[in-house]
Amino acid sequence: MTAAAMNESVLRRALLIIAILGLALGLGVWRSGIDFVSPDAVWMAATLPVVAILAISILRDFWIGRVGVDAIALVSMSAALLLGQPLAAIVIAIMYAGGTVLEDVARGRAQRNLRALTDRAPRVAHRKSAQGTETVPIDQVAVGDELLPCSMSRP
């Protein structure tokens, strides 16, 4: 994984944590009845970083010619904030951020499984020749060579 991909993965996890903590803190403020802080203000403050990073991501993707469905999440969060529904906005932010984190986890698992599969690929082949059977590196196998079944042998 590249450093840039690692940084983006950390950023996506941080956004999810911010959104979840914002929801929990807002619910705590609402439940306790504290007057000097509004739960709506807490939920809005926790939604704004997700909206900002998502907007930057959409612009970056658009610049390189990719168009995705992330715009739906951006419109939904922005509309909820503009309509005075910050609780709905923070829930959408959690759903969006959680989805991106799950994508990262799935991508990492797929990369590990592919790496494990390629690590198990044979490194040598058993080729029939005029002298009998010879063991050759895989990169020396040519079209038309007659090969014998081999185990997962390694040089």
Image: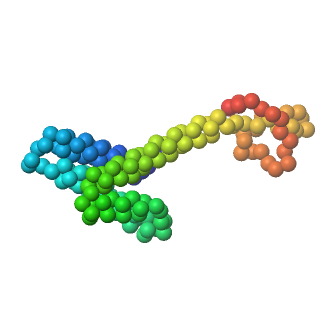
The residue at the point 24 percent across, 46 percent down is: 22
| Residue furthest right as drawn | 130
Q: Is residue 114 above or below residue 69?
A: above
Q: Is residue 148 above or below residue 3?
A: above
Q: Residue at x 84, y 45 (%)?
A: 145
Up-down relation of residue 13 to residue 134 (above or below) = below
Q: Is residue 111 left or right of residue 49?
A: right
Q: In front here: 89 or 147?
A: 89
In this rendering, position of residue 36 left or right of residue 65:
left
Q: Is residue 96 visible?
A: yes
Measuring from the top left, give residue 91's x and y in whole percent. Answer: 33, 50
Percent of width and height locating residue 24: 25, 41
Q: Position of residue 112 (x, y in %)?
A: 53, 39
Q: Residue extending furthest left?
A: 36
Closest to the observer, 153 or 16: 16
For residue 54, above or below residue 120: below
- Residue under the point 51% across and 40% down: 109
User: Is residue 52 visible in the rendered structure shown here?
Assistant: no
Q: How many marks?
A: 0
34 lies left or right of 120: left
Query: In front here: 7 or 142?
Result: 7
Question: From the viewer's perspective, is 91 left or right of 70?
Answer: left
Quadrant position of the C terminus in the picture: top right
